Image: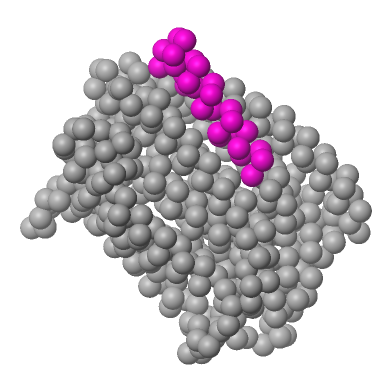
């Protein structure tokens, strides 16, 4: 148990069969709800974190809005590489290639450590130059620099946690990742007001307190993940010592993981660019930051559904079961569309209520209400893009997802936003989100038809 995690082949066989034989609706529900719950709680703590920061000061809210692209980039690299691990393990288990699945699980820890070194380096050497790009306001600069350095230099725990969660999810275990995520999120929510405002005798740390609460929450999640991995039974075993990296496995992981990293990083790059377009207005930057936190309540449940669906898709693709693969895709798409439709209604009918959570003043309200209403038009077409991207990743075609995301979030949004901003003003620029999403939807349909005709149609 000290060096690796093992279970008997009989138990592996029984639990593996569930992915290939249990009714798809029941299987998807059992695998998706823990991820949906944990992702929703994570969205909650991101929003709560921002609410406390916004109520601390408007400058503090602007500071974390400027840092948000880097935070998104960290998550993109961490989860993106872990998605590659998830997809590879699921496909190898479906094809009954146990040794390769085990190697992928063991390699994941090494990938997480490499990701940590990358962002610790960025935090140490580039935090201040990054903040100088966007602001000369000393309060925003100092607060943003402190927040950025803390979350990057101490991201070791989150980077390893991401990998362990995806290893567990790839085997159909969705409860353990939910517990891991919830423990950290609840810790963060509790500590946020204490460390930001200095409650119960704690020092008043302001924006730095929010960052410290985040790191402590990540440490708790990491600790719980290590405990679960060491003490419970799993379909794969992770070798912690004496493991020699197989570069062929690394290549297979990044065949899906690298496009996934780029795909998720595109959102971060887009936000870098959008903040640059809006940099002349602190209020506009803050509104964009608030939107991204609010929309996480809608998108995170869909991403949780994504996490539940991907192992099922990957397993049945590896097992060459076309019927179960496509049934999982269609059912996931229906659920995702329903969630996004509910989000659209909420943003259309209650934008003032949502903005008031952040103590919005008259200027922010005037700018934020039309922003939330215009941007949320993209929600329903986004459901198709996300779940079709899940199908691409689950079948080992991460490049397809990358191409669609580049069109949706980079080649679409930024040029359109730049044009609309300079031609018609800030309010018109928000329409770039739904316009770009329509472009992404068209490309998704084309790529889906191509994949189906070329590969899925020939499955048994």
Residue drawn at point x = 19 percent, y = 32 percent: 137
Q: Residue 281: in sight, yes or no?
A: yes
Q: Nearer the viewer, residue 204 or 330?
A: 204
On screen, residue 385 above or below 414: below
Residue 360 location, x and y as percent?
Answer: 27, 26
Residue drawn at point x = 71 percent, y = 85 percent: 9
Q: Residue 345: in sight, yes or no?
A: no
Residue drawn at point x = 22 percent, y = 50 percent: 146
- Residue 59 appears left or right of 364: left
- Residue 227 appears left or right of 97: left
Instruction: Give the image's coloring scheme.
Output: one colour
Residue 261 location, x and y as percent?
Answer: 55, 52
Residue 388 location, x and y as percent?
Answer: 70, 43
Q: Quadrant of the C terminus?
A: bottom right
Q: How many marks?
A: 0
Q: Is residue 454 magenta?
A: no
On screen, residue 418 above or below 109: above
Give the magenta part as a residue range. 402-430
Name the image quarter holding residue 138: top left
Q: Residue furthest top?
A: 424
Residue 193 location, x and y as percent?
Answer: 21, 49
Q: Is residue 423 magenta?
A: yes
Overall secondary structure of the magenta section: helix
Residue drawn at point x = 64 percent, y = 73 percent: 247
On screen, residue 262 above or below 420: below
């Amino acid at each position: 148990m000290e060096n690796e995690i093992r279970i008997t082949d009989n138990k592996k066989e029984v639990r593996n069969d569930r992915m290939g034989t249990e009714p798809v609706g029941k299987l998807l529900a059992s695998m998706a709800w823990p991820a949906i719950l944990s992702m929703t709680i994570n969205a909650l703590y991101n929003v709560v974190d921002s609410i406390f920061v916004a109520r601390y000061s408007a400058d503090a809210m602007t500071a974390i809005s400027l840092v948000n692209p880097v935070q998104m980039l960290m998550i993109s690299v961490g989860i993106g590489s872990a998605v590659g691990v998830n997809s590879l393990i699921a496909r190898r288990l479906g094809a009954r290639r146990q040794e390769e699945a085990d190697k992928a699980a063991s390699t994941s820890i090494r990938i997480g450590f490499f990701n940590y070194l990358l962002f610790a380096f960025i935090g140490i050497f580039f935090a201040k130059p990054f903040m100088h790009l966007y602001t000369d306001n000393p309060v925003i600069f100092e607060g943003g620099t402190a927040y950025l350095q803390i979350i990057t230099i101490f991201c070791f725990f989150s980077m390893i946690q991401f990998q362990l969660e995806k290893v567990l999810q790839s085997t159909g275990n969705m409860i353990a990742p939910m517990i891991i995520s919830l423990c950290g999120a609840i810790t963060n929510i509790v500590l946020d007001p204490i460390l930001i405002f200095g409650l119960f005798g704690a020092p008043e740390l302001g924006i730095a307190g929010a960052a410290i609460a985040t790191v402590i929450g990540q440490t708790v999640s990491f600790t719980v993940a290590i405990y679960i991995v060491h003490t419970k039974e799993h379909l794969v075993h992770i070798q912690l010592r004496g493991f020699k990296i197989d570069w062929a496995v690394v290549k297979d992981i990044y065949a899906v993981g690298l496009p996934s990293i780029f795909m998720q990083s595109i959102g971060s790059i887009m936000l870098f660019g959008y903040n640059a377009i809006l940099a002349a207005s602190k209020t506009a930057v803050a509104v964009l930051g608030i939107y991204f936190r609010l929309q996480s309540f809608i998108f995170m449940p869909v991403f949780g559904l994504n996490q539940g669906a991907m192992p099922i898709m990957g397993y049945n693709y590896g097992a060459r079961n076309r019927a179960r693969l496509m049934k999982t895709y269609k059912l996931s798409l229906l659920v995702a569309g329903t969630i996004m439709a509910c989000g659209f209604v909420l943003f259309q009918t209650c934008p003032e209520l949502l903005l008031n959570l952040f103590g919005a003043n008259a200027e922010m309200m005037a700018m934020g209400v039309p922003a939330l209403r215009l941007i949320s038009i993209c929600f329903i077409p986004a459901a198709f893009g996300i779940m079709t991207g899940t199908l691409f990743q689950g079948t080992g075609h991460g490049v397809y997802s990358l191409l669609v995301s580049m069109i949706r979030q980079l080649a679409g949004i930024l040029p359109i936003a730049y044009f609309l901003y300079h031609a018609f003003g800030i309010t018109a620029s928000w329409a770039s989100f739904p316009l770009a999403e329509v472009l992404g939807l068209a490309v998704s349909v084309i790529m889906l038809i191509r994949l189906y005709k070329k590969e899925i149609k020939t499955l048994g």
